[in-house]
Image: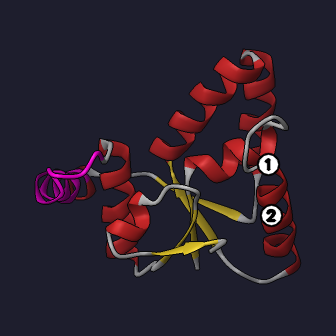
Amino acid sequence: MIFIDTGAFVARYVARDQYHSTAVNAWQELAAGSQRCFTTNHVLDETLTLLGRRGGNQFAAERARALFASHELTIIRTDRDDELRAVGLFEQFADQPFSFTDCLSFSVMKHSGISRAFTFDNHFRVAGFEVWPG
C-alpha cells in the first residue's frame, strides 16, 4: 500500500516541475506492479487547485476526471474522526511547517496502516513515514 501525495500528482502532470521525470518513472513502476494506491479528497483538492494554477482549469478538470474514474486509485474521504486526529497531529507537530492537509494525510495513513508515501515532501519523513522514491 502506498499513499499518493500532492507533489507526486503535480510532478506527473506538469512537465516543467522539477520532479517530473522522477515522478513519471515512479508512476510507470507503480502501474507495472500490484501496489494499492491511496490518497484523500483533500490531497486531490490541493492537487487540482495547483494544476489549475499551472495549466489552467480545463487542464486540471481533464486530470480530475481521469483521477476520479481510476480503478487503481482509492480516494479516502475523511470524516470527523480523521479530522480530529489531524488536529492532534497539527498540535503535536506545532514546531514543524506542516499544513493541515499534511496532518490529515498523516492521520489517514496511520489509521489505515499505510506506512509509505509517494511524495517529494520531506514532511512525511519527519512525521515517521517512509518516503518513495527515496
Q: Quadrant of residue 2?
A: bottom right
Is residue 93 visible to us here?
yes
- Residue 37, x across and y down, in percent: 64, 69
| Residue type highlighted by circle 1 | His
Q: Which residue is mark 1?
A: 20
Asked if residue 69 is positioned above or below residue 129 in the image, the reply reads above
Q: Which residues are magenta?
A: 83-97
Is residue 72 one of those drawn in magenta? no
Secondary structure that dominates the magenta span? helix
Q: Secondary structure at mark 2?
A: helix
Q: Residue furthest front?
A: 18
| Residue type highlighted by circle 2 | Trp
Asked if residue 124 is positioned above or below residue 11 in the image, the reply reads below
Indicate the quadrant containing the N terminus: top left, top right, bottom left or bottom right.
Answer: bottom right
Number of labelled discs?
Answer: 2
Is the residue marked by circle 2 packed among few (<14), some (14-19), or many (20+) residues within 10 Å?
A: some
Q: Quadrant of residue 23?
A: bottom right
In the figure, is residue 126 to the left or right of 92? Answer: right
Asked if residue 132 is positioned above or below residue 40 in the image, the reply reads below
